[in-house]
Image: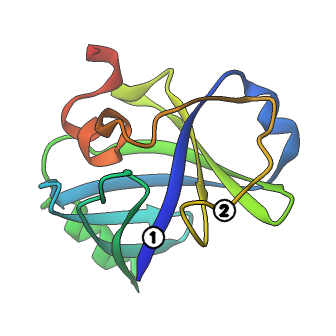
Amino acid sequence: MIEIERKFLVTDDSFKKEVFTQNHIEQGYLSSVPERTVRVRIKGDKGYLTIKGISNDSGMSRFEWEKEIPVAEAKELLLLCEKGVIDKTRFEIKRGNHVFEVDEFYGENEGLIVAEIELNSETEIFEKPSWLGDEVTKNNRYYNAYLSTNPYKNW
């Protein structure tokens, strides 16, 4: 239940030529406290409840627990969430043995595009596409929980 991921800015929309799947995502936070974020998400036609712990010193690893829940329940829980629901499209792109998840944000976070890759270890090597920009793994401003209360448009 340890998630290891790295996060990068995306330099342009050329990644869209490589997409194999995409889903609209709406998510909110019942708790955005970094030590224990509790997220409610609707991704496509599925609902999820996710709990994440605080990241380690590298910013790459943290505890994650996720459970699929009925969409109707996720919609009800979104009504209880803190201010600042995240609205985005997630594009998935295969590159070598990995899948990049590229999130294009809307609303208050319009203009922000971030890519994440999940790894098996913090030192795992992966192929970096040309549209991958600066790494922001350790920068908490790019965490969705932060973006929900401090939107990109206000930076």
Quadrant housing residue 38: bottom left
Which residue: 71% across, 22% down? 12
Q: Quadrant of residue 36?
A: bottom left
Give whichever of 47, 1 is nearer the camera: 1
Task: Tell me the kind of residue under disc 1.
Answer: Glu
Left or right of 111, for residue 22: right
Can you tell which mark lies on residue 3?
1
Q: Name the spot of residue 30 as percent of width and height, x first.
A: 15, 62
Q: Position of residue 10 (x, y in %)?
A: 63, 29
| Foreground disc of the pair 1, 2 | 2
> Which residue sits at x=81%, y=28%?
14
Q: Is 93 displayed left or right of 75 in the figure? A: right
Q: Residues within 10 Å of mark 1 (few under 14, many from 20)?
A: some
Is 125 placed left or right of 118 in the picture? right
Callout 2 secondary element: loop
Q: Secondary structure at mark 1?
A: strand
Which of marks 2 and 1 precedes in the sequence?
1
x%, y% of residue 115?
A: 60, 42
Task: Give the residue number, with chain letter if any, for mark 2.
Answer: 124
Indicate whether 150 appears above or below 36. above
* Residue drawn at 28 percent across, 27 percent down: 151
Which one is nearer the viewer's eye here, 92 or 68?
92
Image point 21% across, 29% down: which residue? 150
